[in-house]
Amino acid sequence: LTDWLKFNWSTRFTRTDGWRPRAFTDSYYDGLGRGNWPNLPVYDRNGHINQDGPRQLAEGGQRNQQIDRQYYQGAFILEPVKNWITNVEFNYRIKNDHVKEATLTYYNYDPQGNEINNGSQSTSLFESQLKENYLNLNVYSSYSHSFADKHNLKFMAGFQAEKMKQHYFSVTKYGLITEQEDFWDFDLTNGLDGKGNSKDTGVEGYTNEWATAGFFGRLNYDYLGRYLFEVNMRYDGTSRFRRGSRWQLSPSFSAGWNIAQEEFFAPVNHIVDQLKLRFSYGELGNQNTNSWYPTYRVMDLGALNGDWIQNGARPNTASVGSLISTSLTWEKVRTWDVGLDYGFFNNRLSGSFDYFIRYTKNMVGPAEQLPNTLGVDVPKKNNCDLKTKGWEVSLSWKDRLNNGLNYGISVSLSDQVTYIDSYPGNKTGTLPYYSLTENKYKTGYITGHKINEIWGYETIGIAKTQEEMDAHLASLPNGGQTALGSQWAAGDIMYKDLNNDGKISEGSSTLEDHGDLKLLGDANPHYFYGIDLTASWKGFDFRCFLQGVIKHDFWPGMSSYFWGVRGGFSKWFTIGLEEHGDYFRDEPLGLDGHEIPANLNSYYPRPIFSKSSDGTSFGAKNQKVQSRYMQNAGYMRLKNLQLGYSLPASLLQKVGVSNCRIFVSGENLLTFTSLNSLFDPETCTGGWGGNAYPLSSTWSFGLSLTF
């Protein structure tokens, strides 16, 4: 705009259209895998689909979704005085998400091929609209100045603000007059269910918003590039917390000494190019919440959704929300770091080393235990301190040979260990446990112990005969294994009596009284490493990048690992995969030449899916957290492999091209791990019990041109 004022502006619009069958939800394959072939034929003798899952997929309606995103970015850059630069940046984002979903009737068929519709199914039309508006404003000004050709100063100060507002509503109306897609509109519904009775329209909606604001500043100084200093300051506020707890100050500073620039180091400068010692301390705030309003208790209200009839209609409902802490505020993360950067032989050999200690103060954790008669979970509070120690080292060698070959190798290795520094709510040291209902390990906080510890039983083995099991139980005269289950037989797990009290139990499940439980490991991965190999010669270029983890203790969970992908111990929700064929059998199974041989040296115990009188599964007794089925999820993976060729410049100049490169690239091509084949080592802690969508191996081919 002028010599001292510039203006940047960019805008972008994207539209994403998605379509799927209405029944194709995240649980679809759950039903399909357990209820279809070989348990049931896919089609009956008349050619009709024979199972509800595929039938719903084909006939049960569809869901259409359209998402529009608009992005606006603008910036003013002012430099009224040389080296005094002010930036005013504006970012605005709009998201519109519209869903239209029709639920249609799907039919079963009798043996003669006639449709069966008992009126239990209702057609319906569902529409929802989500709108999000996000604003981000950054204003910062900096000034740099050098004097006496030795001293370099730079000042910076600024302000930042964010605001997000979200509005959502949805309507569900029953009784589509026609199932033809062109007529899926609310005016073409009659409000009746499949039996012709009136059914109330469902309407939902909400509005959410949050905002943050922050002031920040920085001062840099260096002397001849030899002595380096930096000071930062932030003051941030958030709407997620209440007045009096919204703002927090975050200071930090760092210092560096470039020893290689000292005069006394001159005699070895032909060998040592860089030798810099660094030290830093910093604080940062963490809101640590995914809740819009974590300090307010929310009551859920439902319209006409009661499970009983009152005055001829279903009543409205209200449910009590979880307990909250009105004093919830920022976590403070304080980090001390010391590091060394070095380079030798014209920087052909270079690397760095860092050691850090991080303290998380006022970490959010569950409040102190309250009596079970309370009836709800305890609230989250700022009542826990965390301590992390870690290090990272990297080493790189890059060189060029006389024949024109460029090559390089870079290696990095890092690790960190996190402990609970203090936690008032666990004076007795309640151990972490595995939740059957959530199918995941629940963290227990114990002062002085690592986070994500895994406690379980030590496994003796699987009893091969009833006599072996009886002898094991007889060696436990004070209760055997009855605390874990009943009806112990051949094919069941034999657990070790670690505290020699004549029985197998978890005691009080505390640090002071943990019965026969022992520490089996911690669920945090350790010793991350990366290896990067590069080379180029006469237009050809090559890159190979490997990454991995050396040690990762992993308990594979219940339903994921034992007998199926979902569903705990229910036989109706079990998907027997090939891996599960190695289960205990003390005699052959099958008929008419299709026998499965006995398997006394099996990996898995006998599969039990029956229920006991109290409703618990007998099979759970064999699937306690235990040493036999612990896994090491460490791995090495070929993350990226590239090979390219750049055509000679002498050929390209004739056609007006400055660069032309042809390449092939592969991602996630090979994995080396001892982890059970049911899991991927990079996703085993996600999804449902370690089953997440697997990483894809991808090949890509391309041509890069520069004119």
Image (cartoon, rainbow, N blue to C red):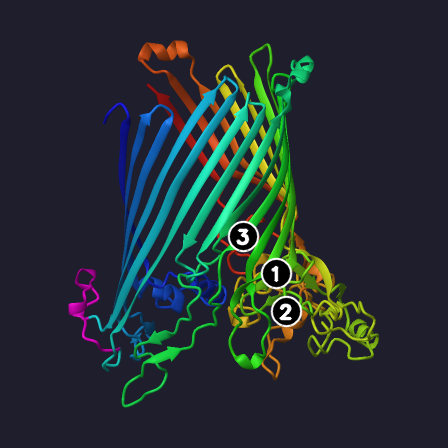
Identify the residue at the far left of this view: 187
Q: Quadrant of the C terminus?
A: top left
Q: Which residue is mark 3?
A: 332
Query: Magenta region, mostly helix, strand or loop?
Result: loop
Q: Secondary structure at mark 1?
A: helix
Question: Which amino acid does the dot numbered 1 rest on?
Answer: His
Q: Residue 209, position in %: x, y?
A: 34, 58
Q: Which residue is mark 1?
A: 580
How many C-alpha atoms fall within 10 Å of the one at disc 3: few (<14), some, or many (≥20)? many
Q: Is residue 191 found inside the magenta-colored segment of the image? A: yes
Question: Which amino acid does the dot numbered 2 rest on?
Answer: Pro
Q: Secondary structure at mark 2?
A: loop
Q: Which residue is mark 2?
A: 607
Are discs 1 and 2 less than 8 Å apart at CB? yes
501 w.r.t. 156: above or below:
below
Which quarter of the picture shows residue 130?
bottom left
Residue found 40% across the figure and 71% down from its top: 298
Earlier in the chain: of badge 3 and badge 2, it is: 3
Which quarter of the picture shows residue 257?
top right
Question: Which amino acid does the dot numbered 3 rest on?
Answer: Lys
Apparent side of residue 429 relative to residue 400 in the rendered image (left or right): right
Q: Residue 478, position in %: x, y?
A: 81, 79
Provide the residue span drawn in magenta: 177-193
